[in-house]
Image: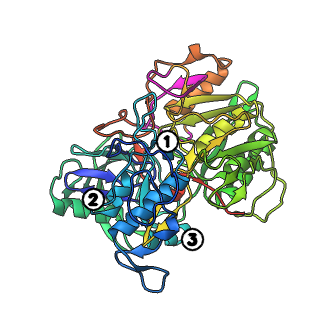
Amino acid sequence: MGIAVRVGFAGAALWVLAACGGGGGGGGSVVNPGNPGGGGTGYTPGVFPPRADFANQCITPRSGTSDRAGSAFTEKMFLRSWTNEFYLWFAEVPELDPTTTSAVVPYFNNLKTPQTTPSGAFKDRFHFTFDTAEWIALSQGGQSFGYGMELVLVSPSPPRRAYIPFVEPGTPASAAGVARGMEIVRINNVDFVNDNTQAGVDVLNNAFNPSAAGQTFTFVLRPTSGSDVTVQLTSASITHKPVLLDTTFTQGADTVGYLVFNDHIATAEAELVAAINRMQTAGVDDLILDIRYNGGGFLDIASELTYMISGRTGTFESLVFNSKNPNRNPVLNQPLVPTPIHTTTQDFSLPPGQTLPTLNLPRLYVITGPNTCSASESIINGLRGVNVPVFLIGSTTCGKPFGFYPEDNCGTTYFSIQFQGLNAMSFGDYPDGFAAQNQTGRTSVKLAGCSIADDLTHALGNPLEGRLKAALDFRASGNSNASCPAASGFAPGAQLKAGQQTVTATDGQMIKSPLRENRILRDR
């Protein structure tokens, strides 16, 4: 966790202010009919002046920028016109009068479709904002302060429940003996589970969001077995390790690779190439790709990994914008060009143009959970688009075939869905996620495999860990669904919905920065 991790305790509840958060419906009843033209700069229902008429007209202009004096009305009118121009479902946005509300961000929060998916989840669960200065620092690779342990939130309100799914090596948490499966009990004598006071909430906030290196907090943690342990953790600048583990197992006469891939960040390129080279040397016959905690990141890295797994070429993903822009990317004002399956390095952490290694595998076994999101789901969808079977072990994925370009106005950066990704077969309709065949509840796409809840009692990479064991057993059975135990994973939907307190005993919402849980495109 670090400065980019958006965790906030507000009153008695734990609110997750991240890219894949929950959402509410719109406030209004008239569906947006589109712009019939004209209208000046005042508000007229159904009329949308150019967004440039209101851009950078701010309540509080920033010095040294193009901001100028404006008002809440001009900021809201900018957002209204911007949404009408770029939002994927602009025609479903309720008509909202900007003169009847005072605050800008709450107005933006309702500039989205109120429609739901078949599971009952909101179709748009991914609407959010970020302070522009923080976003610039984050997106340009500024320091991230934390302890080297991730956090999964199972229950956000008292009685809260949160656990640590993994610890990164060489970090303060690792040095202190923090381990997978430990639950948070107390921080600096504040009861994490039950404290309802603002003073206590402030302590928890400060602990989860250290603002600099060298800040020390005392954590009481509960292992999966044994007594509570007390550790002092001092924040440090954390560099995430996207490939947490790679190893092989022997199954009969075959060698099976296992790779824990947690982040589509720039350093993943070099780490993935090194891991695939090791597996190529080992002569693996199959691969189990563990992306249960991978929220996404750079789409080009997902494309690279697709080639390194399968050796296939062709289209990886095509983008579809709203009906106003059938052939052009309206943000970049460029013709729509599909992202190919990359066969060479793309200049993330290796020099560009180097031939990527490939395992040339005919199928993939993938371990997933509700935090498998966005660019990670693109690997599943992209492989299926080039006729590579994908077998799924775990819980239903996030359900996010969507993405957006950030938009700054008056010191706030806005994120509103602008495109959907389609594979080479023009499929991208999985708003309720991918799930195993025996998963109960509504999901968008069911794949052969087993629904298995997360197993916190074993380390990642231990062949007895529930999801890994199920993947190995499923493979040994000849990929028979009859080999699956009773379904225990999570469905339907991707994240905690309004009023929902728990997912399963172990499947919750992981707290990550927007850079680590989205489809991120690079300008070319």
Q: Quadrant of residue 106?
A: bottom left
Main secondary structure along the magenta-highlighted residues: loop
Label 1 SS: loop
Labels 1, 3: front one: 3
- Point out the residue furthest to the left here: 197
Q: Which amino acid type is shown beneath numbered disc 3?
A: Gln
- Point out the residue furthest to the top here: 482
Which circle marks residue 516 in the picture? none
Q: Which residue is mark 1?
A: 459
Q: Which amino acid type is shown beneath numbered disc 2?
A: Thr
Q: Residues within 10 Å of mark 3 (few under 14, many from 20)?
A: few
Q: Is residue 517 left or right of residue 203?
A: right
Q: Which residue is mark 2?
A: 101
Q: Position of residue 172 (x, y in %)?
A: 44, 64
Label 3 SS: loop
Quarter that holds the N terminus: bottom left
Quarter that holds the C terminus: bottom right
Q: Which amino acid type is shown beneath numbered disc 1?
A: Ala
Q: Which residue is mark 3?
A: 140
Q: Is residue 450 left or right of residue 316?
A: left
Q: Are marks 2 and 1 in contact (CB under 8 Å)?
A: no
Mark 1 or mark 3: name the one nearer the start of the chain. 3
- Residue 458 covered by magenta stretch: yes
